Each structure stands twice: as structure tokens, then as C-alpha cells.
Amino acid sequence: MFRYCKISNITVLENWNTSKSENFCFMFSNCKLITNIKPLKNWNVSRCKDFSAMFEFCSITDIKPLECWDVSNGTNFKEIFRYTLISDIKPLEKWDISNATDLGAFFQGCKSLSDISPLKNWNILKCENLTDLFASCIELTDISPLKNWNISNVKNISGLFWVCKNLTDISAIQNWNTLKCEKMRSLFSRCTYLSY
């Protein structure tokens, strides 16, 4: 809708009725002047299935306005926060993504992201794609919050930790069930400090 637009103030969208909207794909993609998404706080997104690339390349740092979003019907979250400036993802802690099938590149390029503990209780049982999920998250050092993730239905984990150059320990995911994984290309590529 606003992809590549040079808008910075989205206050005019505050009272939009989005209760019947099922697709927000690319809505604010590459709107690099957007820094404040507070006007979206009360949006009803409960029917949305596709959130892919919704905020990619936006200059947002604070996603607290999205804390109470009901994303439980969402299936596609691919690239939703790709290359944004977020570092605090605690507002996503209670997101219900149990119907998500695609989380590919969800946080790709979030170079300030270091704490992923808010994700530890995410239910990703239906997820099939984790490609590039944390790719280029160069400040990420601890992936222990992912220890209990059930990836038993995931088919693609290619590039999941690609260029996580400060990652030193991956023992937390040693018991992941990768039986259905068909693609693992560049899973830890360029994780230069990773050693055993």
C-alpha cells in the first residue's frame, strides 16, 4: 500500500478500521522515514493472515505499540521486521504465532538485536520455513532461548544464523529435531567465532 513511499508521519492512519483486513503484505515496506508506529497501536489485525515484509527497512526502533496485537490467525510473517532498527523485542513475547508457517527472515539484518529471550515460549510447531530468521543479527551471542523450540515440521533452516558473527556457542540447539529439514544451506555460514 505505502511501499517505497516517503511518508514519515502515519498518525492519519490511527483510526482506520482494519478489522476485516486479511493481508498487510509489504504495507510499509521500504518506508525508511517511518520511525514511530504508535498510531497502529489499536489496529485490529485479528483476521490478518499475511504480515510478510510489513515493516521491512523501516527505521523503527520501538515496537511496543504492537504488543497487544492479536496475530493468532497469521500464517506468513516472512521478513516482517527485516532490516529494521529494533533491539528490544519484549513486546513480541506474548504474540500467538501458533499458526505461523513462514518465519523466514523475520529479524534478518536487525543488527542491534542481542536478546532473544522473549521468544523462548513461542509455539512454532506449524512452521515450515525458518530461512534467514536471524541472519546478519551481528550482536546475537546467546541462542539458548531457542532450546525448547519444536522445529519438527520445519523443512528449511538455510541461513538461519548466517553472519551471526559473534555467536560462539550453539549447544543449546543440539536436541532440535531436524528430521524433516530438507535445506540447511549456509546455516552457520560466516559465524567466524564459532568453534569446538
Image (cartoon, helix red, strand yellow):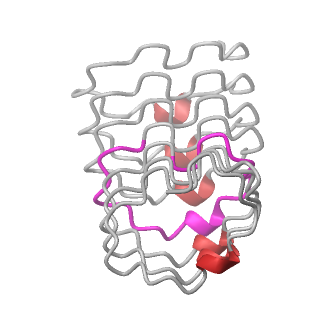
In the rendered image of this protein, does residue 27 appear above or below residue 142?
below
Q: Position of residue 155 (x, y in %)?
A: 27, 29
Question: How many numbered discs, if any?
Answer: 0
In the rendered image of this protein, does residue 168 appear above or below residue 5?
above
Residue 44 placement, left or right of 65 = left
Q: Position of residue 59 (x, y in %)?
A: 75, 51
**Residue 17, image quadrant:** bottom left
Residue drawn at x 51%, y 54% as measured from the top left: 54
In the rendered image of this protein, does residue 28 appear above or below residue 20?
above
**Residue 108, image quadrant:** top right
Residue 175 placement, left or right of 1 = left
Q: Position of residue 76 (x, y in %)?
A: 35, 50
| Viewport quadrant of the C terminus | top right
**Residue 176, image quadrant:** top left
Q: Is residue 97 one of those drawn in magenta?
A: yes
Residue 90 placement, left or right of 175 = right
Q: Position of residue 89 (x, y in %)?
A: 65, 59
Tell me which segment is drawn in magenta: 80-103
Residue drawn at x 32%, y 53% as measured from the top left: 100
Closer to us: 74 or 135: 74
In the rendered image of this protein, does residue 30 appear above or below residue 173?
below
Q: Main secondary structure of the magenta part?
A: loop
Residue drawn at x 66%, y 28% as measured from the top left: 136
Q: Is residue 104 one of those drawn in magenta?
A: no
